[in-house]
Image (tube, rainbow, N blue to C red):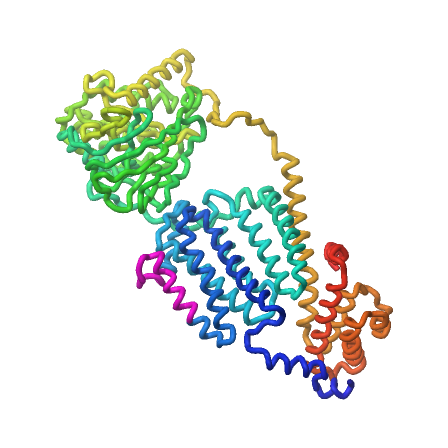
Amino acid sequence: MSQALRTGAPSRSARHNRRAAKTRAPGEQAGPGWRWGAGLAVVAVVCGVAGWGFHRVFPGTELLLAIVPAAIAPAVVAAFTRTRPLWLALALDLVLWLAGTIPLYGTLSPAVAADVANSWHALLTTLLPAQPDPELLVLVHTLVWAAATVGAETLTRTRTRIAAAVPALAVYGMALLLGVDGEGSNLPVAAALFVLIAVLALLRDDRSPLWLLAGIPAAAVLAALALVAGPLLPIAAEPYNPRADADLPPPKRVDSVSPLDRVSAWLQIPDRDLFTVKAGKPLNWRLAVLDRYDGVRWTSGARFQPTGGRVPEGEWTGKADVVRQWVTFNGLPGTWLPAAERPQEVTGVRGLAVDPASGSLLAGSKPVKGFRYEVVSRVPRPSKQDLLAAVPVPDKDLTAFPDSPQEQLFGRLARQATKGVNSPIRQAYRLQNYLRTNARYDVTAPPGHSLKGLEFFLETTRRGTSEQFAATFALMARTLGLPSRVVVGFRPGQTSGGIYHVKSGHVMAWAEIKFEGLGWRPFYPTPGRSGAKDDHEVASSAIEESEQLEGEFSQGGSDRPKTSRPQATGEGEQATGGVNPWLVASSVAGGLLVAYAVAMAAVPWWRRRNRRTAPGAGQRVLGAWRQTCDDLGLRGEHALTAGDVVSGQPGEISTHLTPLAEISNFVRYAPESVTESAATDAWRHSDAIRRAVRARTPFTTRLRHRLLLR
């Protein structure tokens, strides 16, 4: 024994094992073949489940088209090339990956590589859910394929237990980051991954199949506990959102002709069919929002982002009417999409883009006649108290007025119209009434909304269309410090059988002012064609509401608004004076349980790894001996000699324990002569003892030791 250790010659059992290894084909796994095949299947399922974590990004079934072949094909390749060189397997995977993109694109696209490189930023600037376009789905396809390839080859060419599942966990982590804003939850996906990885570990442990029957339910119970405790963790409330740090696309001009420039032209041909809307009530159909003015024209500063249909919520969170609309195009030009304010969800539009700030909708291409889509809108219904307490939002961009001599004219007329009024909401109502009573509606008025043209409108003609009235109101409001913009849209239209037929003559523009908590509130400064009241239902009701509020101010005798908060739509809400202590306690307890579970799984593994990889062959031999003592339940028994440890052990353990004790004794007395082969033999004996001890020790005993971090 001593001579063998000094010269580094292998023992008889070591030589036997090496001869057996040489006779085994490359890639052949020890143990029954069904374990190897089942392990490959589990790796494929793990990768597929991890890819399903992207369901918050792509909620449709199109996601399966990207996941299923990407998870299965690498496992098949690994099965057929397990005795072949690794480079051959990787080459086949690369070819099949490219072929797997054909179902996504419908053909072999030369832009696959570029799409993979660009899809990251595209998804970060997309409002979830994302459109299931092949240019985006190819990222999921590639990630799952790469994870399945690495996992399958790791399983077939190494003896590791769960290392094959690590790439899938990386894919799941990417899905968590990219799906932060999406609907649904990934906790069930995490629970499924936990159970599958536990199954993989049991399969790779060369134990009786009965262990699978006992281990899978135990893993499922732990996964269920994590599923319940997960939402209570603090990080679940506000997870990190990478979209907050992504660079959004710059504002762009949507059409060559602004919708506001089309108002006068449409009014000259009032009977041209534009679109129809099927809805339960008449509303104004918003088309475009224009918030920038350069002295010549109003334009949009919208930063459109792709979306699969969801539109972010606006500032108002109180009472609102939910209205569903079905819009059909009959000749409306451009790519703007009309909808009642404020859209929440849009279906039926390919390449849909939305401006989160205004809720404006844009089609990816010019809609053709007969194009149809569905919109669900949320129309705010603030109370009188909310309106009376309204405070304008401080925003320099929305109160900017171009440097020009006309600014004095607009400011003077605005102050004249609001003389003696300090309340912002009342100032807006006074401006609205001033324009409605001091100018008249005339479709034959000269078009345009430049400062020169609006000056001519105010001082000379005092007649115009909604183009001039809305643009003038917005500019006068800005001189008073009220953040304003212009909206172009349409009146409800002519109704027939619950369908509103909107023609070019129904076009109109109005102005909006932004208030804290309320968001944007509409104002209608354009008088009706009779010169007194407006001639359609929506604007008339808004004018009546403003007159009633004027009466509220007069009766109160003061312009000072009352303190108020937007009224929430939910019922049964309780007033809270702080964080619920039971929620805090549950979160802390859940966090501690999760941390302890991680430590329970990681500490023994980390201790064994450090001993196995210690610097120097002598230290690794001693580490193998200490690990064996721990496995035998003798941790801390420092007074025992090697002979004491060996005595009393059963045959299947003493067979490996005796040579290990001899190697460790030699290290203690001649550490400078220890060779690498001695360290290898020591850990081979230690691993064999560990397996024998685990086979003899009841599950409850081993679980108790693991809970005590032994």
Residue 656 falls in which quadrant of the image?
A: bottom right
Q: Quadrant of the C terminus?
A: bottom right
Residue 629: x and y in percent read 78, 68
- Dominant secondary structure of the magenta stretch? helix
Seen in the picture, residue 121 relative to 162 is either above or below; the reply is above
Seen in the picture, residue 646 relative to 433 is either above or below; the reply is below
Seen in the picture, residue 54 relative to 413 is either above or below; the reply is below
Left of 234 or right of it: where is 619?
right
Q: How many numbered circles are shown?
A: 0
Question: Would residue 416 be visible to someone looking at this image?
Answer: no
Residue 277: x and y in percent read 27, 31
Q: Quadrant of the N terminus?
A: bottom right
Left of 4 or right of it: where is 26?
left
Residue at 55% in and 61% down: 166
In magenta, the rendered stretch is: 92-114
Question: Would residue 59 be visible to someone looking at this image?
Answer: yes
Query: In this orientation, which residue lies closer to the viewer: 329 or 415?
Result: 329
Residue 464: x and y in percent read 18, 26
Seen in the picture, residue 32 relative to 305 is either above or below; the reply is below
Left of 218 or right of it: where is 349?
left
Q: Is residue 619 magenta?
A: no
Residue at 30% in and 38% down: 373
Residue 558 falls in which quadrant of the image?
A: top left
Query: In this orientation, which residue lies closer to the viewer: 651 or 163?
Result: 651
Residue at 63% in and 37% down: 583
Q: Is residue 98 magenta?
A: yes
Query: In this orientation, which residue lies closer to the viewer: 195 or 240?
Result: 195
Residue 543: x and y in percent read 30, 19
Residue 550 falls in which quadrant of the image?
A: top left
